[in-house]
Image (tube, grey):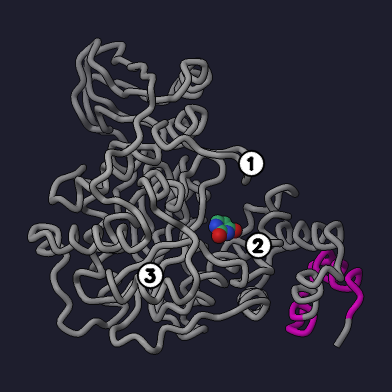
Amino acid sequence: MGFDAIEVITTKRDGGELSTAHIDWVVAAYTRGEVADEQMSALLMAILLNGMNRREIADWTQAMIRSGERMDWSALDRPTADKHSTGGVGDKITLPLAPLVAACGAYIPQLSGRGLGHTGGTLDKLESIPGWRASLSNAEMLHVIRTAGAVVCAAGSGLAPADKKLYALRDVTGTVESIPLIASSIMSKKIAEGTGSLVLDVKVGSGAFMKTVENARELAETMVALGADAGVRTVALLTAMDRPLGKAVGNALEVAEAVEVLAGGGPSDVVELTVRLAREMLEAAGVPDARDPEEALKDGSAMDAWRRMISAQGGDPDAVLPRAAEFVEVTAPESGVLATLDALKVGVAAWRLGAGRARKEDPVSAGAGITLHAKPGDLVRSGMPLMTLHADETSRFARALQALEGAFEIRPSSGSGLLPLIIDRVTA
Ligand code: URA
């Protein structure tokens, strides 16, 4: 059935409910170019302001899935699992997690994205490994999964094309921050990717999309319900993003930290979250006789899976990672306990150093970023380095240092009011 775009827009503008037929039509017609950008912009703003109910969100998600191909991994002989993070600063968890869960018995078909703004993208991080290729055909994906147990690559243009067009429009019309639109955008891609189970890492805090636990919970509940309705076993964790994750922020710096975790070391928060997410993924996937993730980190089998995964995509796991030419240290102005370290300010500083991009087509610097020498809760002495800033050009330091103004507090004693690393778990 055909509709008039104005009828759909005014229904939502006036606080009404869009029918399944309205939603199917407007998403398909917009993808074909028959509904104009200015009309879809008006509808997106009406959705942002007036919301959508669960049925409308489910219909919107299904319409976006139907706009493209749906991948199928039923030929594989083990359960499939995936993880999606809503994005944060220093969030390199996919890098150790995918090979770790593969080493424990599941297959991981993970389609990832690039960073935009202050949050980094998994593909940008992996591309700092010399030779590594993000774009694979479906046949190549299957080959990498069979070789390594896990594949992390770019989504092809055939997957949820409606979301690609809508996301680009939301980005320039101030309509990204809508829970129904974020939930349907993420879940349409994950359901179309064909994973049997999904663990969502919904970040909370200054460095995340969701600044409060309440909003994060609503997003998590919406996505978990969408997954369950589509037959994907879905669980969500709400996790802290009021401070950066780990001690490395920036593409190659984060790859190096991920390799430390795979070698049995690494910062305790990265290890704890990786192991917890691995356990959740193995449980959601229902892997019979799954191996213990802590064991797989200790005995080197997760590292072996990482090396196979990187090599199968043309990368050299032994290559020396790129390093930025210039560095500057930020030192503690006084002694005490590092009470806070703001994730957003650190993310913006790393972005200005060259680790992130302002526009989709911009290149990123592989070596740029920030190494943290202290984390909230640590004792620091006046004059000791708190962080090292890395960039390819010295001209980048001034604006990065500006972003770090007020980024941390040193107090005489602890008692910081930080969020717990793992705040809550949401199931269907
Ligand atoms: N990530 C997505 O894929 N979509 C959104 O809307 C927000 C974050």
The residue that mark 2 highlights is 164
The residue that mark 1 highlights is 359
User: Mark 1 to mark 3: distance in Å?
Assistant: 28 Å
Classify 69 as above or below 279.
Answer: below
x 59%, y 79%: residue? 69
Secondary structure of the residue carrying tag 1 is: loop
Assign ligand 1 to one image quadrant.
Answer: bottom right
Horizontal side of residue 165 vs 191, given as left or right: right
Residue type at the position of mark 2: Lys
Sooner in the amino-acid sequence: mark 2 or mark 3 = 3
Secondary structure of the residue carrying tag 3 is: strand
Q: What stretch is highlighted in magenta?
A: 3-24
x 39%, y 53%: residue? 132
In which quadrant of the rendered view does residue 367 lie?
Answer: top left
The residue that mark 3 highlights is 82
Foreground of the two, 258 or 269: 258
**Contact (Cβ within 8 Å) of mark 2 with mark 3:** no
User: Mark 2 to mark 1: distance in Å?
Assistant: 15 Å
